[in-house]
Image (spheres, grey):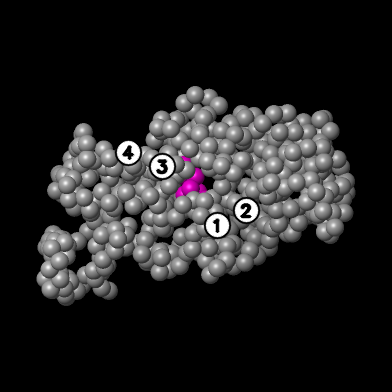
């Protein structure tokens, strides 16, 4: 299957071709483990999961690396603000090491509950300090660094194409000199590779280095760890769009300065999750976690379904109402799968009919065109409503779609699906047939009977959805 992805480097949809035939090397910016991941953060990892599933579906062996930032990382990406780990330690009374371990486990629990495939490697920054120091020394030997105020900085003026990912020109970069910044910097957009105590006193996480006892800047960890596990050149680097202008720009500058060649071929970025007209963020307090959604009665898979309904490069507006709609659709899908399993004795077609193959073809086209999951969901519901397809074909097609959708439908148990009794399913079918025949009086009667049995019916473009009247 030929794949086409939107490459932020070039701002265009491009044919995907790997450096090594049959192997896709993928690096995704991971969590800073000082607090729970909010659902906006988790949208990024759901996007990464879909990308990985599509790559594997297309036949690639995927080497997937996600870093764990357990070294203090400032509240501002531009070397300003307070250390997030120290701030969390002060507020909770726990050590920074305990905080990092606790929230790392919480992160893995979240991604497991969302059916996100765990990365091939999840390296911790604190385990790779030596690799970071070695890379800084490499940059130093090539003349890309300078020392000021006890810290080691990367000199962006030595990098002629600095800012190419963010489309920042040299004039704009130097105009920033009018802004009040770190007085140690030669250029306000230079960034720290290594902090020492001259910058932050009494830091909890510090290591010996050629420049003094201290700790690494945030940007260097991704470059050092990605190169260790994927090599000095690899295929795809992912992250949120907020990483484009600073973090990923700085990663590119230091990585290509160190190696003297192109670092990454494809840059893919997901858009924000928006709540109350603002970006979901811990710093603003404008965020929700999976646990808070569970408190409102939602499953993590309801949120997975919700995110699939928006293209990864489009902002996704979150509300309890929109999540409720996704939850109803997800439950409706699970119920249909349970019913199809019953009708077929869980025996999908081994060879899908020509009519069914049309849906598979469309499914693959939607995926290959920059991961268009909203179109995939639309195709799924269109297939389920196709009266010309047999139950075995439908079940086989659902299982094929689910290789990407990731609901683990082949192992779905009836209790998980909150399946309806057969008599209620028959009433729903009778009502649907009445609607097709435009027998509105009979359809209304069936609706009233269902309501008496505690089932609320809603007609949508994706078919009939139901909820229990609790």
Q: Which residues are magenta?
A: 44-51
> Where in the figure is residue 107, as x and y percent of width and height?
51, 52
Residue at image point 65% right, 65% down: 91
> Where in the figure is residue 265, as x and y percent of width and height?
59, 34
Q: Is 201 covered by the magenta stretch?
A: no
Q: Is residue 449 visible?
A: no
Q: Main secondary structure of the magenta part?
A: helix
Instruction: Report how far apart the C-alphas of labels 1 and 4 lie in the structure.
Output: 30 Å
Q: Are marks 2 and 1 in contact (CB under 8 Å)?
A: yes
- Label 2, residues with CA under 10 Å away: few <14, some 14-19, many ≥20: some
Q: Could you tell me which quadrant the C terminus lies in? A: bottom left
Tell me the SS state at disc 3. helix
Instruction: Report how far apart the C-alphas of labels 2 and 3 lie in the structure.
Output: 25 Å
Q: Is 46 covered by the magenta stretch?
A: yes
Q: Which residue is mark 4?
A: 361
Which image quadrant for residue 417?
A: bottom left
Q: Which residue is mark 1?
A: 272
Q: Earlier in the sequence, mark 3 or mark 4?
A: 4
**Horizontal side of residue 207 vs 180, given as left or right:** left
Q: Nearer the viewer, mark 3 or mark 1?
A: 3
Q: Which residue is mark 3?
A: 367
Residue situated in front as seen by the camera: 374 or 466: 374
Q: Which residue is mark 2?
A: 242
Q: Are marks 3 and 1 in contact (CB under 8 Å)?
A: no
Residue situated in front as seen by the camera: 296 or 108: 296
Q: Are marks 2 and 4 in contact (CB under 8 Å)?
A: no
Tell me the SS state at disc 4. helix
Residue at image point 62% right, 66% down: 284
Q: Are marks 1 and 4 in contact (CB under 8 Å)?
A: no
């Amino acid at each position: 299957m030929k794949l086409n992805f939107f490459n932020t480097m070039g701002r265009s949809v491009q044919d995907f071709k790997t450096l090594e035939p049959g192997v896709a090397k993928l690096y995704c910016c991971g969590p800073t483990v000082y607090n729970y991941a909010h659902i906006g953060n988790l949208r990024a990892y759901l996007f990464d999961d879909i990308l990985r599933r599509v790559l594997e579906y297309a036949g690639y062996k995927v080497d997937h690396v996600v870093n764990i930032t357990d070294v203090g990382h400032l509240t501002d990406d531009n070397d300003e603000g307070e250390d997030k780990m120290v701030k969390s330690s002060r507020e909770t009374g726990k050590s920074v090491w305990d905080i990092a371990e606790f929230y790392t486990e919480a992160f893995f629990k979240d991604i497991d509950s969302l059916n996100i495939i765990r990365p091939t490697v999840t390296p911790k920054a604190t385990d790779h300090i030596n690799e970071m120091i070695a890379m800084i020394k490499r940059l130093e030997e090539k003349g890309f660094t300078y020392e000021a105020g006890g810290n080691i900085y990367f000199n962006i003026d030595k990098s002629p194409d600095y800012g190419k990912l963010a489309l920042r020109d040299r004039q704009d970069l130097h105009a920033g000199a009018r802004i009040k910044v770190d007085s140690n910097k030669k250029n306000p957009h230079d960034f720290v590779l290594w902090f020492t105590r001259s910058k932050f006193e009494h830091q909890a996480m510090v290591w010996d280095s050629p420049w003094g006892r201290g700790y690494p800047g945030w940007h260097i960890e991704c470059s050092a760890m990605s190169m260790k596990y994927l090599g000095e050149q690899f295929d795809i680097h992912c992250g949120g769009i907020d990483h484009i202008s600073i973090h990923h720009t700085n990663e590119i500058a230091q990585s290509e300065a160190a190696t003297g060649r192109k670092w990454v071929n494809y840059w893919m970025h997901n858009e924000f999750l928006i709540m109350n007209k603002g970006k979901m963020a811990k710093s603003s307090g404008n965020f929700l976690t999976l646990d808070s959604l569970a408190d409102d009665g939602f499953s993590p898979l309801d949120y997975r379904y919700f995110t699939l309904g928006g293209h990864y490069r489009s902002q996704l507006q979150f509300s309890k109402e929109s999540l409720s709609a996704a939850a109803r659709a997800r439950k409706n899908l699970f119920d249909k799968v349970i019913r199809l399993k019953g009708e077929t004795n869980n025996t999908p077609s081994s060879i899908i009919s020509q009519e069914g193959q049309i849906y598979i073809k469309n499914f693959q086209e939607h995926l290959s065109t920059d991961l268009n999951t909203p179109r995939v969901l639309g195709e799924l519901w269109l297939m389920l409503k196709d009266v010309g397809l047999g139950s075995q074909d439908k079940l086989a097609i659902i299982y094929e779609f689910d290789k990407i959708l990731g609901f683990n439908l082949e192992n779905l148990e009836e209790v998980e699906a909150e399946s309806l009794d057969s008599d209620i399913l028959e009433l729903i079918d009778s009502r649907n047939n009445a609607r097709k025949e435009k027998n509105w009086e009979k359809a209304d009667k069936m609706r009233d009977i269902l309501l008496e049995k505690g089932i609320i019916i809603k007609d949508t473009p994706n078919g009939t959805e139901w909820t229990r009247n609790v």
